[in-house]
Image (cartoon, coloured by chain):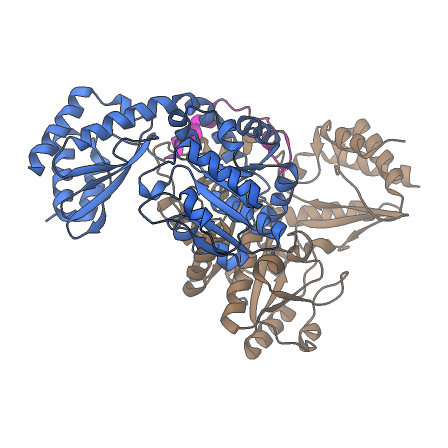
Chain colours: A brown, B blue
């Protein structure tokens, strides 16, 4: 039997990888800074041309009055919810059971901000309007994550979004967008970022998913909101003397990749269809609505590991470096399309899926 | 009359500056990354060779069991105090009235961690052993800042430090070191960092003061302490997917400047003596105990601005870009010696102080 480490190792040896924008190595920073003038002055504690210009660029792109650069989305989103809770005098918010805040942040929202959370909808599905209509406790803010990452990147239809937005406005509930992958969903909705964001009071976006930057986030909204967010940013320890390594790389890779989102989306649909053509494999969603999807395989993790390692070694194409165990008979992994997919020769890709199908039969 | 902006502008035009390591511009990052291998892998959420190696290096340097890299000292220190408060079950700490936590962090410690603070000692002086002996409320932790930056960088003698440390140990009070400028005080104490740190339960150090890096901090202590600090780092939103721009630049500038601290210290003593030779000027401390001191001038801010601008224009040497008003008749500024001081020709420096003396007489 071959262990998990062997899958990682076999993956690292592959020449091509189906997902992502490439290795997270120092070259990502070096490429972004190659064309930067050494004499350009650093941002200083949230001020200066470097940070202000990018914040303005993103505020315009998102159609919001103002935007603030943060080192992380974890920090930005907790702060957004805190501001809306303070505004309403109610320390309660609602979000999906698999929200980043609920499962990846060590309960920062509860431990630092003492905000109570209501989990809306089922783990396996999306939050619907009826979930919000049936709320029996008052909340200050509803957080929607588009796409819902932990279920493969699913999206409500646009009509539902508008209905949720209108209902929240009527009820005095602030609507916050977890837009970690906002760029990636615009081709599906056929809307601009500003059109989507107009449905929300506040918006967070990330620069190291589809954009492929180093790290960093933007929080956008009205001027009073972003002004308050700067005070909380300092309290959290996020108001660094220099954030420019993240800002300039975010700006560089935004310009490099923002026009490629439709391309990634189409490639995700193509690749998901290839997976779904194999016995015992199903993607979620079955037809992607962004650049991402999850691949579920009805085989034990050990069996799939062995199969994948053989395919990587035979074809030089890596599909994933890890597998999550759904249960004893099923495992899954995530795919997010970036620059790397298009560099794989189509014949090589056909070979991979012929092999996969053969080994699963 | 010439306004404040003119002082900044005149300062920017100078060829030499008496303080600091040079401009905070992109070149600082570019220099550090010039020799970095593009294929080196990024740290990932606190793991990976890049971050682990530097943490180990700093733990060894500080003589502590373990160390964690943080994006900021604000984050690191709040977390240190929180851990010690939780350990003791008492949400109360003590520090100097001009501690960074009290005056520069928008009350993060109180707003996020609900920790009560006792201010020990006078604003104009240092915390003494008697201040701690006279505490009439129980505290979980005492924070000492060495040197006490806001009063010009003053230090207690080593005997007092040892007495405070022994008393705290006896009383079950955790002792935390705000060592933002720890490297800079070692020449005065003639001790290693590890010797100083052995008096403290936990230590924070910074990489953008004397070291001249981009940003970033290390928090060090026992393994259980640093393990807990990682959980809080994630809660604060400081567990970034990639912190390497700060880590590798901190490492680069640490190696470049750590051996220069004695040099900076001696230059600070020399420069302070030049200031003190002028009518109406007094430095605090009168003889520096690190690379830093404050310059107090018994003239109105407007008068001093005018004098400085004239000197900058005549000599091409800048002393400060700002002035703080102490009261109607006195103003002051801070000097921290770095690489730039030694590049100023001694005759030029003499000229500056002759002019300054002449204009103040």
Apparent side of residue B145 relative to residue A156 in the rendered image (left or right): left
Apparent side of residue B235 relative to residue A305 in the rendered image (left or right): left
Residue B24 appears at what percent x and percent y?
Answer: 36, 35
Apparent side of residue A324 relative to residue B247 in the rendered image (left or right): right
Q: Residue at x 73, y 67 (%)?
A: A121
Apparent side of residue A131 relative to residue A179 in the rendered image (left or right): right
Q: Residue at x 62, y 63 (%)?
A: A144
> In the rendered image, which quarter is residue B307 located in?
top left
Residue B74 appears at what percent x and percent y?
Answer: 47, 46
Front in this rendered view, residue A210 or B241: B241
User: Is residue B47 within the magenta segment?
Assistant: yes
Residue B271 appears at what percent x and percent y?
Answer: 23, 28
Is residue A335 something that shows in the picture?
yes
Front in this rendered view, residue B2 or B20: B20
Residue B230 appears at what percent x and percent y?
Answer: 62, 43
Front in this rendered view, residue B63 or A35: B63
Q: Residue at x 61, y 33 (%)?
A: B66
* Quadrant of the drawing holding the C terminus of chain B: top left
Q: Is residue A162 above or below residue B213?
A: below
> In the rendered image, which quarter is residue B287 located in?
top left
Q: Which residue is drawn at 55% across and 23% down?
A: B37
Is residue A207 something that shows in the picture?
no
Query: How many numbered callouts?
Result: 0
User: Is residue A80 within the magenta segment?
Assistant: no
Specify start and end residues of the magenta stretch as a single range.
Answer: B25-51
Q: Residue furthest right?
A: A361
């Amino acid at each position: 039997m071959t262990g998990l480490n062997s899958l990682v190792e076999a993956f690292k040896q592959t020449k091509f990888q189906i997902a992502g924008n490439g290795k997270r190595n120092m070259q990502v920073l070096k490429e972004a800074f190659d064309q930067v003038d050494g004499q350009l002055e650093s941002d200083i504690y949230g001020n200066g041309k470097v940070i202000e210009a990018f914040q303005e660029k993103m505020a315009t792109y998102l159609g919001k009055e103002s935007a603030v650069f943060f080192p992380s989305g974890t920090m930005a989103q907790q702060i957004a919810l805190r501001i809306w809770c303070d505004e309403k005098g109610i320390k309660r918010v609602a979000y999906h059971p698999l929200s980043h805040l609920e499962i990846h942040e060590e309960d920062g929202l509860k431990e630092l901000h003492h905000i109570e959370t209501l989990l809306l909808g089922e783990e396996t599905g999306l939050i619907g309007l009826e979930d919000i209509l049936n709320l029996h406790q008052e909340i200050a803010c509803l957080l929607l994550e588009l796409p819902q990452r932990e279920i493969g990147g699913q999206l409500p239809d646009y009509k539902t979004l508008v209905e949720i937005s209108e209902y929240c406005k009527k009820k005095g509930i602030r609507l916050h967008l977890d837009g970690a992958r906002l760029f990636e969903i615009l081709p599906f909705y056929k809307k601009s970022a500003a059109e989507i964001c107009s449905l929300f009071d506040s918006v967070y976006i990330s620069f190291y998913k589809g954009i492929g930057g180093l790290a960093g986030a933007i929080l956008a909204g009205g001027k009073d909101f972003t002004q308050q967010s700067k005070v909380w940013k300092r309290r959290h320890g996020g108001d660094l003397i220099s954030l420019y390594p993240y800002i300039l790389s975010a700006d560089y890779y935004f310009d490099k990749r923002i026009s490629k989102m439709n391309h990634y989306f189409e490639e995700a649909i193509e690749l998901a269809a290839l997976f779904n053509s194999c016995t015992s494999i199903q993607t979620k969603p079955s037809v992607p609505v962004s650049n991402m999807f999850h691949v579920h395989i009805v085989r034990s993790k050990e069996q799939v590991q062995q199969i994948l390692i053989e395919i990587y070694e035979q074809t030089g194409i890596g599909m994933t470096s890890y597998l999550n165990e759904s249960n004893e008979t099923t495992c899954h992994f995530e795919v997010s399309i970036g620059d790397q997919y298009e560099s794989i020769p189509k014949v090589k890709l056909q070979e991979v899926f012929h092999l996969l199908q053969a080994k699963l039969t």
